[in-house]
Image (cartoon, coloured by chain):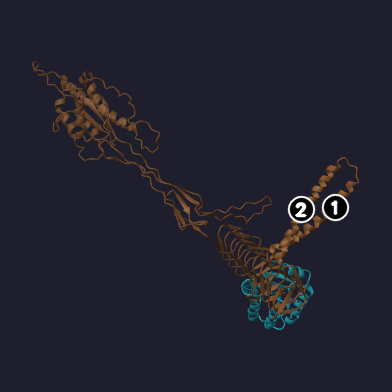
Amino acid sequence: MKKRVMIVDDSIVARNEIEKLLAGTEFNVISHYRSGEEALEAYGKERPDIITMDIIMPGIDGIETSRQLLKRYPKAGLIIISSLAYDETIEMVKSLGDSIPFVFKPIKKSYFISALLEVCDSRLI
Amino acid sequence: MKEKNRKGLFGFFQNSRNSRDTPGEPLDSSAVSLEEAAQKTAGDEAVDAAAQEESSPAVEPVPPLPPIWEPSDDPRLVRINEDILNIERDQFALKAQSLSDAFRRMADAPREDDAKEPEPIAAKPQIYISKNGMAAWIYVIPPFHDGKDISEEDLISFLSQNRVTTGILEDALKSIAREHIYDRPVLVAKGILARNGIDGSIKENFERILHLEFEEDERGSVDYKHQNNIQSVKKDDVICEITHAVPGINGTNVMGKPYLCEKKGSEAAVPAGRNTVLNEDGTLLISQKTGHVTFSNGKFQVEAILKVNGDVDNTTGNLNYDGDIFISGDVRNGFSVKASGSVDIRGSVEGARITAGGPISIARGMSGNGRGVLTSDSHIKCRYLEHCIVTAKGNVYAESIINSKVESDQDIVVTSGVGAIIGGSLLAANNINAHLIGSKVRRLMTELTIANAPKSVDEMELLTKELKQLHHNVSELKKNSLYLETSHREDKEQMFEQLKQAIESLENREQEINQRLEELSTDDNIQMGLIQCRQLLPVVRIRIGNASLLVNEEHSCGTIYRSSEGEIVIGSN
């Protein structure tokens, strides 16, 4: 059975790119949301296997969204995807949890798939 | 005439006529009085019906008379139904005729004493005032036995006694007296007709409620973008045109009392709201500001700021407004917002086009999806800019600029929040300031350019290209010229001349281009712009004027500038 992926990114370009990368894989995009607030509200109903989370979004950023999400759902499968490839942001992501991958934009497919599989293993999805 | 208390036939008639003792009351005594007068008293019973038929002249039908009031096309005149007045007149005439007949019979009745001369009976006027008080007729019973004819003075006095004071037809009175007009009703007074008023009216040049109409094209698609649901207005534009009421004028009946008009004419209520004003004569409602017109609480108002509560999407369509625009929500993909003033967006912007004469402010950021465009003649402030094209005459402020093309005629400032410039190309006339430039992802190239006039960079490129083409063309023409020297064409001279002119023209243009390039180069040499950042991550291409540097290593830097030798220097912190 395909793993269910929720995309959280305000960029349509990014969302389309991720969908394209996952086409033909064992991962299936079930929904996408433009903001952290929308994603937090939807997560409880949809319970995706994995969330891909952008950092810069309208409203609360992806780091804060992830913090709130993990507080409510500690076992949520999470991957951060962002252009902010800096030491500071890398540290911020690490502070969320050790096993949360950070995939840089522009996304390289191999890194991305590898991150997804890593999350599946760690969360026993 | 002074027989008010006389009994019998005449007394009945006189007494009932004198019952009109309340001014202004419609006078309707003629029917009552003549009815009573027609009742025979004991003294008159001797005159039997047969004798009446034999001796009294037959009642002749009253011939049609000219209209009481002159015909008029004036729609305001309150016309009176003259047919009804004529019926009343005819009824009066009939009854007055009966009275006259009775007098005649009495005058002709055999006397007890033949030796004695019969007493003269003076002419007697009878008056009838119409029920609405607007016409009065006099019927004069003729004199008998050489009685006194009626005089004009008698008639005038008679009218006065009967309180007829207005609209007296003096010619009619003269005619009655002069021509001894007896046994016929004559119009002696007519009232002044009333004129109705006209209500004021208002012509509104703007809609109170906008009805959105969506049209389908031949494919069945509906265009939600062009909804045209803003009523723009400029200062001093006319919102309403007001036509003042024309007041009605009451008429006057023959007794001097008002004859009311039916319509008084009332002013229309002017829907004057905020930022509108009436002109001096109250005929125009004018906008005091440039903005847009709305209608609420029964009034038109002008607002300078166009406020959109919610998103710019299918429900609003594109916006194009002469003034400032405030949007509380987002601007969705594919829509455009254009304002001559500022644009203040409290939500976020997707792949939309925002154009403003004033500043643009986007509270939550813009993710342009490769098609978002911001253009401002002033500054632009945005929480983040991602995948969009930005052009500003003023500064550009953001917390992060990612994979975007940004041009500013002044500074680009990315020093709040994350303060990161990642990918894309940025061009500023003065300075570029950021915390972080570039990213750990080496595949991403970030281009930064400082140029006095950003457009001069484009212009230099274009002119250089044109110069190259021009040199090629001149070279070709010169080759043709050489070839022509060896040819034997009949039109050789003419061709030479044409080639010469063409080469001259191109050489002139070459001179122009070189001159302009020199100017641009001179401007460029005095380029004082700076790039400031804390951390520079490869790969970054930096241009300051015509100097260029490709950065392939990480730097903790302070200021990047062009030295006096014309080289780009990365100054460390």
Task: Write down the chain letter for disc 1.
Answer: B
* Left or right of A39 in this view: B255: left
**Disc 1 target residue:** B476
Where is residue B434 shown, x and y percent of the image? 67, 74
Q: Are marks 1 and 2 on the same chain?
A: yes
What kind of residue is marked 1?
Glu
* Colour brown belongs to chain: B
- Hue used for the chain lettered A: cyan
Label disc, if present, on residue B343 of the rendered structure: none
Picture layout, residue B15 above or below residue A114: above
What kind of residue is marked 2?
Asn
Using the rendered view, name the quadrant where residue A37 is placed. bottom right
Where is residue B287 shown, x and y percent of the image? 48, 54
Residue B93 appears in the figure: no
Residue nearest the viewer, comparing A59 with B320: B320
Picture layout, residue B99 above or below residue B401: above
Where is residue B295 shown, x and y percent of the image? 49, 56
Quadrant assignment for the N terminus of chain A: bottom right
Of helix, strand and loop, which one carries label 1? Answer: helix
Where is residue B300 shown, x and y percent of the image? 47, 55
Task: Write down the chain letter for disc 2.
Answer: B
The crowding category of the residue bearing disc 1, from other C-alpha atoms within 10 Å (few below 14, some 14 to 19, many at least 20), is few
Question: Residues under labels 1 and 2: Cα distance?
Answer: 16 Å
Label disc, if present, on residue B508 of the rendered structure: 2
- Residue at (26% x, 20% y) in the render: B58
Residue B76 appears in the figure: yes
